Image: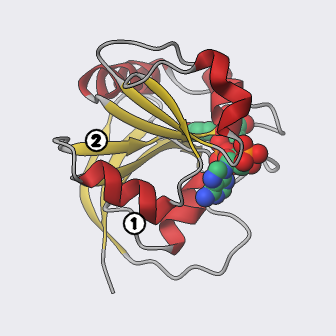
């Protein structure tokens, strides 16, 4: 199983606009179409509790969603075993457990806290980054609050609209 980290960011690296969690307010139609496509094609999707609370997903027989939280009991009412689960496993424990299941990809859809905890432990294989031609100045980056030194290699880059939204894929080089 490969772990792919998926984000849409601006040219100045922001994944939120001025603290507003709603990404769809500023991401391009091309990115929304792309995200919908990879969402439909990916059955295993992992996110942090803050991302879940900002963009609630519904349990679905065609997906296995795992939400990472230190307090799974708080989310008991949302849980449907095998479809929408809440886990207090560490990134390494979760990756090792899910690796035993028969998935080709695990999509890690954020947010920055979860992304950084997986990046720190070298548990990410690919970065699928949409780059929107916008600059926000303030807002969060997808890697935060830690000293990282990760080298990547471009797999693909596609210009998907007139303005120049780029859909990129990078492989993380393991040390
Ligand atoms: N532009 C994009 O592509 C994109 C993608 C995703 C999200 N976002 C934005 O990012 C924001 C949310 O990101 P975020 O970084 O604040 O939150 P997050 O990464 O979604 O969730 C962080 C929370 O997850 C829980 N957690 C469980 N295990 C963890 C671990 N090992 N490491 C870190 N956290 C762990 C903690 O909450 P508890 O333990 O208290 O539950 C923690 O506060 C939202 O505004 C969202 O819209 C943007």
Above-or-below relation of 95 to 105? below
> Which residue is located at x 28 percent, y 63 percent?
154
Q: Residues within 10 Å of mark 1 (few under 14, many from 20)?
A: many
Above-or-below relation of 153 to 60? below
Q: Residues within 10 Å of mark 2 (few under 14, many from 20)?
A: few
> Which residue is located at x 51 percent, y 12 percent?
58
Above-or-below relation of 131 to 119? above
Callout 1: SS: loop
Ligand 1 visible in quadrant: top right
Which quadrant does the C terminus fall into? bottom left
In contact (CB < 8 Å): disc 2 and disc 1: no
Q: Quadrant of residue 56?
A: top right
In front: 95, or 167? 95
Determine whether, in the image, residue 143 is placed left or right of residue 119: right
In front: 94, or 149? 94
In front: 124, or 19? 124
Dot 1 corresponds to which residue? 123
Determine whether, in the image, residue 169 is placed left or right of residue 132: left
Cα separation, mark 2 vs mark 1, equals 25 Å
In front: 113, or 132? 113
Q: Quadrant of residue 147?
A: bottom right
Callout 2: SS: strand
Dot 2 corresponds to which residue? 158
Residue 78, position as x, y percentages in the image: 61, 17
Residue 43, position as x, y percentages in the image: 29, 28
> Which residue is located at x 31 percent, y 48 percent?
98
Farthest residue in the bottom direction? 175
Q: Is residue 134 visible?
A: no
| Ligand 1 neighbours mark 1 (CB distance < 8 Å) | no
Q: Is residue 86 visible?
A: yes
Q: Nearer the viewer, mark 2 or mark 1?
A: 1
């Amino acid at each position: 199983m490969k772990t792919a980290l998926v984000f849409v960011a601006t040219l100045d690296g922001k994944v939120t606009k001025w603290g507003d969690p709603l990404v769809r307010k500023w991401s391009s139609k091309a990115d929304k179409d792309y995200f919908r496509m990879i969402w439909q094609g990916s059955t295993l999707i992992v996110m942090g509790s803050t991302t879940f609370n900002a963009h609630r997903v519904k349990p679905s027989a065609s997906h296995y969603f795992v939400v990472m939280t230190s307090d799974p009991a708080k989310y008991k009412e949302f849980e449907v075993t095998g479809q929408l689960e809440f886990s207090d496993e560490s990134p390494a424990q979760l990756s090792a457990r899910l690796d035993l299941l028969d998935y080709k990809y695990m999509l890690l859809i954020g947010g920055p806290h979860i992304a950084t905890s997986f990046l720190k432990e070298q548990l990410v294989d690919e970065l699928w980054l949409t780059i929107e031609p916008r600059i926000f100045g303030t807002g969060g980056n997808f890697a935060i609050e830690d000293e990282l030194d990760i080298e990547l290699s471009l797999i693909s880059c596609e210009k998907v609209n007139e303005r120049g939204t780029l859909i990129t894929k990078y492989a993380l080089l393991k040390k």
